Structure formats: structure tokens, C-alpha cells
Image: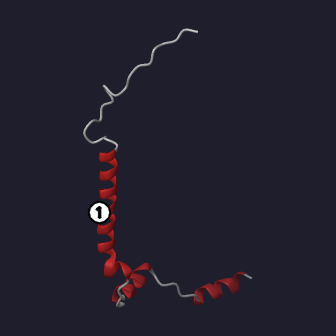
Amino acid sequence: MFPLVKTSLSHLHVPSIQQIMARQSHQKRTSDFHDKGGNAVLANGDTFCIAVWTYVATQIGIIGNLSPVGRVTLKEWRDQ
């Protein structure tokens, strides 16, 4: 069985990494979604994210006053 496996593996051609990369670099790549509109989608997503976080942060009041001093009041202690 071993000579049969050895013979079949000797006929198997596996290209090296350099050959694969050279072949891929010489092929003309067609433009896809990311080439056509990827940057615009990324910019729109960034703008939307910043706008939403700005709205949320200003509506709940964390931009101007990060400290809870003055907003937190102590409750009276009740003995039971």
C-alpha cells in the first residue's frame, strides 16, 4: 500500500504560495461593491453613528455635567 500512496503523491502538483500570489497579482480583478461604494457607505455609517450618539448624550445630559454631585440626594434613615 505504501508504494501506491507514494506514487500517487508524487504525481500530485501543489503550487507554492509564491506561485499562487504571482498568479493572483497578474489577474485583472473586477470591481466589486467595496471598490464602487465602500468608502461612501463607511462615511455614511460613521456620520449616522456620531449623530445618534451626540443626540443621546445631549438628551440625557452627560456632556455638560458628568458629576452626580447635586443630583443625588440622600434618603432619611429609618430605624425598624
Q: Secondary structure at mark 1?
A: helix
At x 52%, y 84%, the residue is 14
| Percent coordinates x, y for residue 45 in the rendering | 34, 65
Nearest the viewer among 67 and 21 is: 67
Seen at 35% across and 78% down, the residue is 34
Quarter-wise, where is residue 3 in the image?
bottom right
Q: How many marks?
A: 1
Q: Residues within 10 Å of mark 1 (few under 14, many from 20)?
A: few
Colour theme: secondary structure
Image location (x, y in percent) of residue 8: 64, 88
Across and down, in percent, residue 1 comes to 74, 82
Could you tell me the amino acid type at mark 1?
Answer: Thr
Q: Quadrant of the C terminus?
A: top right
Residue with the most extreme left position: 64
Residue at position x 34%, y 28% from top? 71
Q: Is residue 49 above or below residue 72?
A: below
Say which quarter of the image contains residue 68.
top left
Residue located at (48% from left, 13% from top): 77
The residue at which mark 1 appears reads as 47
Estimate the x, y position of residue 76 in percent, counting from the top left.
45, 14
Between 22 and 45, the residue placed more toward the observer is 45
The image quarter in which residue 39 lies: bottom left
* 32 lies above or below 60: below
Above or below for 66 versus 76: below
Q: Is residue 73 left or right of residue 40?
A: right
Viewer-proximal residue, 49 or 35?
A: 49
Q: In the displayed image of the protein, which residue is found farthest to the top?
A: 79
Q: Is residue 67 left or right of residue 5?
A: left
